[in-house]
Image (tube, rainbow, N blue to C red):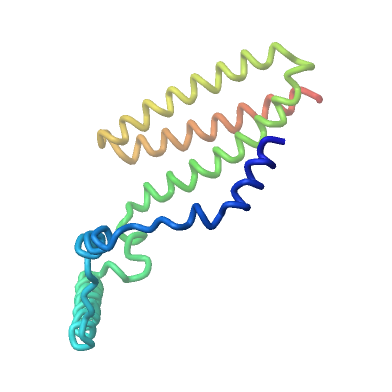
Amino acid sequence: MNTDRLEDFINANRGEFDNLEPSEKVWKNIEKNTRKVKKLSPVVYLLRIAAVILVAIGLSVVLIKTGTFKSGQLAKQADPEMVELIEAEAYYASQVNEKMEEIRKCYDIHPELKEEIEGDLSELQQMYNSLKNDLNENVAKKTVIEAMIENNRYRLKMVDEVLEQINC
């Protein structure tokens, strides 16, 4: 109710509230302190555009000459053994994850599986991480990559065998 009376009072006396305006001195100070926008002449504007285009063309030429834009250049430079490892790692990881989801569904029926399987997979993961460290240190690269792929195969085999043995 108070707000309605206040609103009515303001509406009735609006003319008396709007009579104050800042002095001419205030407006001059505001005008003096604001930045004035410089208008660019069309020639300067066109020169700026030309400079940007020139830099873009120069950069493109340098990148093309150095071979950065060639398609498949990075793939050709990559070590084929590393590419094989990355592909194998992705494949085995997806397979193991899919099968582990099926096994996890059976943990309620076979609770003893959880500790055993998770423990074995954890051990294999630790071994895999150790092999990865060896690979980063460039220790017998081909042998390490083969061991890493074999580790992945063993993990998948273990999960497959567990799925065969349990019936959920």
> Taking the image as drawn, is residue 61 in sight?
no
- Relative to 84, 38 lies left or right: left
Along the line of sight, the residue nearer the viewer: 139 or 25: 25
Count numbered badges in the picture: 0
Establish if 91 lies above or below 144. Answer: below
> Taking the image as drawn, is residue 25 in sight?
yes
Along the line of sight, the residue nearer the viewer: 62 or 103: 62
The location of residue 116, given as percent across then percent down, is 62, 14
Instruction: Give residue 103's quadrant in the image.
Output: top right
- Relative to 128, 134 lies left or right: left
Instruction: Give residue 163's quadrant in the image.
Output: top right
- Residue at position x 59%, y 40% from top? 94
The location of residue 100, given as percent across then percent down, is 65, 30
- Relative to 148, 22 lies left or right: left
Along the line of sight, the residue nearer the viewer: 110 or 147: 110
- Residue at position x 55%, y 44% from top? 91
Establish if 25 lies above or below 62. Answer: above
- Residue at position x 81%, y 25% from top? 168
Quarter placement of the N terminus: top right
- Residue at position x 18%, y 83% from top? 44
The location of residue 158, given as percent across then percent down, is 61, 26
The location of residue 73, given as percent across then percent down, is 32, 65
Q: Residue furthest bottom?
A: 43
